[in-house]
Every structure is written in structure tokens, then in C-alpha cells.
Image (cartoon, helix red, strand yellow):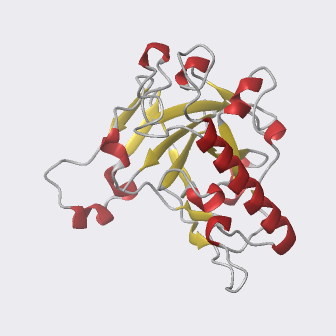
């Protein structure tokens, strides 16, 4: 875990860049990824570790799921890097993401028998994301435009709910099994929740080939686009440069 720790971030510093351009997030070899995500905020990792100078990760939100968990109806397209509620990318030297799963992981992919039932929902999310982006560009703050009223002051949202610190215990570790490429170690089931604060990372360890992931940040998806997970968790393993996402629902 990191000594650096911030919560409820509504004021921007030089290491945070909201609403990055989509073309700066994904490798050009996977253009179809743009159909499945919206960009939220980019994070310069040197704020957490000076040895990570020049490495930038991107908080993103998927359009899926409409119901249930992302990936829970596409298991025939899963591999060792994807599972329901989990997906992984590799961070390239140019700070673009390469998705380590298959395109069919996403229900809306052309390879699946998808009838278009989500498209009205997707367009609504895109619309709110664009409105929130425009408000940010004009006023420098993040708001939820769904609830914005002319006769009331703006209801400011967090750019990030948390940056740095360490893993925290919630619903996410037990929502679905982690992809096979990774290991997840939890504290003993007999341990009281009140005692987890005494353990680094609440006793949670996630690793790839024996190398630990570091908890980077989390934010509610609906802060940016009026819908989404209650919390998006982003973690990073610097040896393989794998960025792992999972989602917490209350």
C-alpha cells in the first residue's frame, strides 16, 4: 500500500486529467474497444511511486452490464485474463491499453447473439457523459447533469473517490472468482471486519506470477455518466504492466 492517500477528490492536481481522449487510451490494433467504454480520468502514477515516472493509467467505465455483471453471459469467450466482473489490460510504453481478453467478452460484440436491447441505455450514458464533460470544460468541476437544475447550485461529484492507500474490503472480492491468471488471497473468514484495519490492504493480496498488484484508485461510474458501478477499482502490477479492473456493487 501507499503512504500517499487522498479521498473525495474534487479539486484537480497536475497528476489527474479528466475526460482523456479515447484515441489516447486504447491501442490502435483494437479499435472496437471504443464501442464498450467511456473515458473518465487519467492518473500519472509517479504521484504514487517516483519509479513509475512516465506511466499513466486510465480510469474507464464499461457500458455493460445493463443487469448482472459484465461478462456473466459470455463465458465461452473468456480466457485466463477475464471473468465475470473482472477484466485486464496491458499498459504499453505509450500508455495505451491492450485488452488481454477476447472481443466476445462484451455482450454487445458482433460475435455474440445480441439483439440491441441495450442501445437506448448506451446512448443515454453517452449523452450524460458528454454533458458532464462539457460542463467540466466550461466550469472546471464535475457534476451529475442528470440532477443539475438551473435554480440550484451544482452538486459536485468526486473526480476520484480514492487515490492511493491500499485495498479495502467490500463486496467486490467475493462477487465473482478472479480470472485464472491471477491469485487472490483474503484474510481468514473468522477475522472480524473491525480487525481488518490492522492489516495492510485489509489483508487482501492479488498477484500475477507472484508479483503483487497495487491498488491505485476507485470511483463511482455514475459520477461521470449518471450510471455505472457503485465503485470501479483500478489496480496495477508494474512488472507485467497489467492493469486490472473489478467493480463493487452495494
Can residue 91 be spotted in the picture?
no
User: Image quadrant of residue 199?
Assistant: bottom left
Q: Looking at the image, is 166 positioned above or below residue 180?
A: below
Residue at screen point 46% across, 28% down: 71
Q: Furthest residue to the left?
A: 190
* Lateral position of residue 139 relative to residue 234, left or right: right
User: Image quadrant of residue 123?
Assistant: top right
The quadrant the C terminus occupies is bottom left
Can residue 56 be spotted in the picture?
yes
Query: Residue 78: x, y in percent?
Result: 47, 18
Q: Looking at the image, is 196 positioned above or below residue 108?
A: below
| Front residue (pair 118, 38) | 118
Query: Residue 3: x, y in percent?
Result: 54, 65
Query: Residue 36: x, y in percent?
Result: 65, 34
Please count the marks in the image.
0
| Front residue (pair 117, 168) | 117
Residue at screen point 48% across, 34% down: 70
Query: Residue 203: x, y in percent?
Result: 32, 52
Q: Looking at the image, is 9 positioned above or below residue 170?
A: below
Residue at screen point 42% across, 27% down: 179
Residue at screen point 58% across, 66% down: 4
| Front residue (pair 236, 31) | 31
Q: Furthest residue to the right?
A: 138
* Lateral position of residue 237 relative to residue 129, left or right: left
Amino acid at each position: 500500500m501507499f503512504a500517499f492517500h487522498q479521498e473525495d477528490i474534487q479539486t484537480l492536481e497536475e497528476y489527474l486529467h479528466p475526460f482523456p481522449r479515447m484515441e489516447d487510451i486504447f491501442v490502435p490494433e483494437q479499435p472496437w474497444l471504443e464501442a464498450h467504454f467511456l473515458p473518465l480520468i487519467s492518473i500519472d502514477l509517479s504521484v504514487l511511486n517516483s519509479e513509475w515516472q512516465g506511466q499513466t493509467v486510465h480510469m474507464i467505465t464499461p457500458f455493460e452490464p445493463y443487469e448482472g455483471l459484465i461478462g456473466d453471459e459470455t463465458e465461452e469467450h473468456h480466457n485466463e485474463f477475464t471473468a465475470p466482473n473482472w477484466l485486464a489490460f496491458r499498459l504499453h510504453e505509450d500508455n495505451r491499453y491492450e485488452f488481454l481478453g477476447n472481443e466476445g467478452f462484451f455482450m454487445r460484440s458482433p460475435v455474440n447473439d445480441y439483439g440491441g436491447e441495450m442501445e437506448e441505455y448506451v446512448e443515454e450514458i453517452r449523452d450524460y457523459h458528454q454533458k458532464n464533460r462539457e460542463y467540466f470544460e466550461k466550469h472546471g468541476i464535475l457534476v451529475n447533469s442528470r440532477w443539475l437544475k438551473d435554480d440550484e447550485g451544482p452538486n459536485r461529484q468526486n473526480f476520484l473517490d480514492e487515490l492511493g492507500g491500499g485495498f479495502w474490503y467490500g463486496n467486490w472480492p467475493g462477487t465473482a472468482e478472479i480470472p485464472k491468471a491471477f491469485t487472490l488471497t483474503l484474510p481468514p473468514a473468522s477475522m472480524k471486519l473491525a480487525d481488518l484495519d490492522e492489516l495492510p490492504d485489509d489483508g487482501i493480496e492479488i498477484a500475477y506470477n507472484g508479483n503483487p498488484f497495487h491498488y491505485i484508485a476507485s470511483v463511482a461510474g455514475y459520477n461521470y455518466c449518471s450510471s455505472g458501478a457503485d465503485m470501479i477499482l483500478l489496480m496495477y502490477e508494474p512488472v507485467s504492466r497489467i492493469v486490472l479492473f473489478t467493480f463493487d456493487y452495494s
